[in-house]
Amino acid sequence: MQKTRVFYIFDKISNTFFGFLKSSWRIKSANLISIFFGYFVFTNLITNYLSKIDNKFLIVPLLILAFEIVVRIKPNSNSNIYFYWLMIDKIRIGGMYALILEAFKLGS
């Protein structure tokens, strides 16, 4: 296929949606373990420690603020710490999933 503008658009779309298929097994497994670890840690944090703390309305916004700080400090993909930032970001995704799931459990 020729390197046209349409080719670059389709390449960008396929990398966006199916880019994880091109990565190595090490990156795939590290991403999956990080998501599960984030979910496990934040589920235990929310259920166990928030029930013991008096000021519950302060902890959840602080967690969300910490999640947003992780998003804002994204390094370049050429950086040496980019892989570690990806793991921290996946832990953040698992933690946010746990936080939202806990909110749905409390609402129902």
Image (cartoon, rainbow, N blue to C red):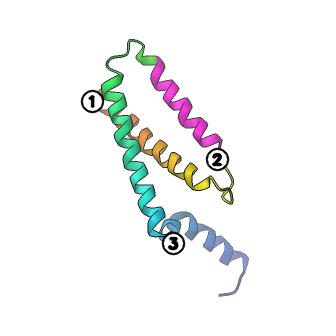
Task: Name, please, the residue furthest toward the bottom.
Answer: 1
Query: What residue would you read off at disc 2?
Result: 74
Left or right: 63 as drawn, with respect to 100:
right
Instruction: Tell me the crowding category of disc 2: few under 14, some 14 to 19, or many 20 or more residues within 10 angstroms, Cα based.
Output: few
Query: What residue would you read off at disc 3?
Result: 22
In the depicted structure, whether residue 100 falls above or below residue 91: above
Number of marks in the rendered image:
3
Please, what secondary structure does the residue beneath circle 1 have?
Answer: loop
Residue 84, horizontal then vertical, whole percent: 55, 51
CB contact under 8 Å: marks 2 and 1:
no
| Rendered residue at 30%/26% (across/down) | 48
In the depicted structure, whether residue 73 falls above or below residue 78: above
Question: Is residue 68 part of the magenta span, yes or no?
Answer: yes
Which image quadrant for residue 14?
bottom right
- Span highlighted in magenta in the image: 58-74
Residue 63, horizontal then vertical, whole percent: 49, 29
